[in-house]
Image (cartoon, grey):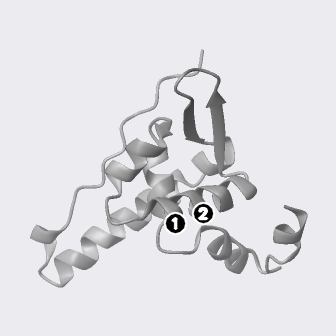
Amino acid sequence: MHDVIKRLPALPVERALAVISGRWKAVILYHLLDRPQRLSELRRLIPAISQKVLIQQLRELEEHRLVHREVFRQVPPRVDYSATPLGLSLEPVLLALCDWGQRHAAELNEIDRIADCVVRPRAAAS
């Protein structure tokens, strides 16, 4: 992991974009904002992504400490992915991007082709 971090740019905005860049990372994080998800749930929520790419993107997000992978020792084995506190700190950024995407669609008269930005409130920590 240290090799990955050593290769990150020094300029903060460039670093942030490098960490969440790629077609699917922001989408994956968006779906992890409200609750942990299993791999199969993420595949259902993001049908255009292949399982191989999803796993690769999740591993990269894990390396940057934005996603936590928890393995439950049961039969059959269960693995949950959740946003870490660092990943959750991107919520305002992701929601702002979602809002901007809606405005862009409206500007291009394509608002009927776009989904709502919906993140369910997380349960309060006990």
**Viewer-closest of 90 and 21:** 21
Examine the rendering and report whether any part of residue 25 can be seen.
no
**Viewer-closest of 2 and 111:** 2
Badges 2 and 1: C-beta atoms under 8 Å apart? yes
Cα distance, mark 2 to mark 1? 5 Å
Residue lying furthest top: 126
Helix, strand or loop status at disc 1 = helix
**Viewer-closest of 40 and 12:** 40
Q: Residues within 10 Å of mark 2 (few under 14, many from 20)?
A: few
For badge 2, the amino acid type reads Gln
What residue do we see at 62% from left, 50% from top?
87
Q: Quadrant of residue 96?
A: bottom left
What residue do we see at 21% from left, 76% from top?
105
What residue do we see at 35% from left, 71% from top?
100
For badge 1, the amino acid type reads Val
Q: Quadrant of the C terminus?
A: top right
Residue under numbered circle 2: 56
